Image: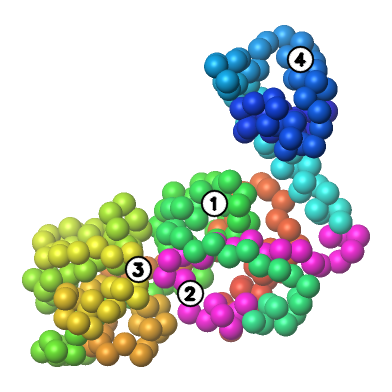
Amino acid sequence: MDIRQLRYFITIVEERKISAAAVRLHISQPPLSQHLKTMEDELGTKLVERNGKFLEVTEAGKALYKYALQMTQLMEEAKMEVKEVGIGVSGRLALGINTFSVVGLRELLHGFRAKYPKVTYKIHQNDSAQLCQLVRDRIVELAIIRLPLELQDFKVIHLHTEPFYFIASTKKKPFNCEVTLVDIQNHPLILPSTEGLGVHYMILEAFSKAQLHPNIVAECSDISLLLDLVVSDFGTAIVPETVIKQYKNYNIQAYKIKDTELTASTGLIGLKNHYLSKTAQNFVNLLTEHKND
């Protein structure tokens, strides 16, 4: 088998029809069928079986498909690295950003663009668990996520740790400068993020460790809507400090939560033991310099 046949097989699996795969590959159907037969003869097993109008992948075919994806990706990475060495730094920065993002990211990207004007960008915003999967799937090379998470597959650079704040409408009676979880447990809380995601889990874990039972009235992963609800006195909320710095124009009260259990760490992740493009390496270097300033 060669890399071309592996690409043909990937397309056959994804299209589930020889005719559709042939159209996508811009080749005629008979030679594509012959390539598939040659691969099956070489491996001594069926890779796909017809099921009505469509092809179903056998267990052997599924195993080959998995390795075919890895091998074609490695081939692309090899070509990319060789080209970058030959022509200098250019290309695309594929970056994942946590839903709450990071303070100063816009300024950082402006600085990176000024230094590397030929670079283009693909930026995905999502929750941290989904960003980890995007890095595993090689959809993005790097991601800025909220910790803690299971990160054995990744290289991690810790960026910073920040406190959480309790926010409320200005219609509420003000607190002192700082508050505790005891102070706020009976207030109607809107959790930023939804069940199963990082910030949601951290907040509930902090209350649980303090043996407190928060009065949760809503969950909202859209931070702008959450802040609008707080402003209208629909409820109060607990948010990372980043949110306070990013959304300064909202008419809310904000109080730092004194409980040391409730803090959020941010990290930059990339996949272990995989080639990182020059563009991504340069972004890591710039972000590290920015962190140390």
Label 4 or label 2, whichever comes before in sequence order: 4
Q: Which residue corresponds to mark 3?
A: 222
Label 4 or label 3, whichever comes before in sequence order: 4
From the viewer's side, name the closer residue of 149 and 238.
238
Residue 145 painted magenta: no
* Label ID, residue 134: 1
Q: Amino acid at mark 4?
A: Lys
Residue 59 position within the rendered picture, expressed as x and y whole percent measured from the top left: 57, 18
Up the image or down, 215 lies above or below 242; here it is: above
Q: Amino acid at mark 1?
A: Leu
As measured in the structure, the alpha-carbon distance from the residue carrying label 4 to the one carrying label 2 is 52 Å
Say which of marks 1 and 4 sits in front. Answer: 4
Say which of marks 4 and 3 sits in front. Answer: 4
Residue 53 position within the rendered picture, expressed as x and y whole percent measured from the top left: 58, 20
Report if residue 251 is visible in the image: yes
Q: Amino acid at mark 2?
A: Val
User: Quarter of the image holding residue 39?
Assistant: top right
Say which of marks 2 and 3 sits in front. Answer: 3
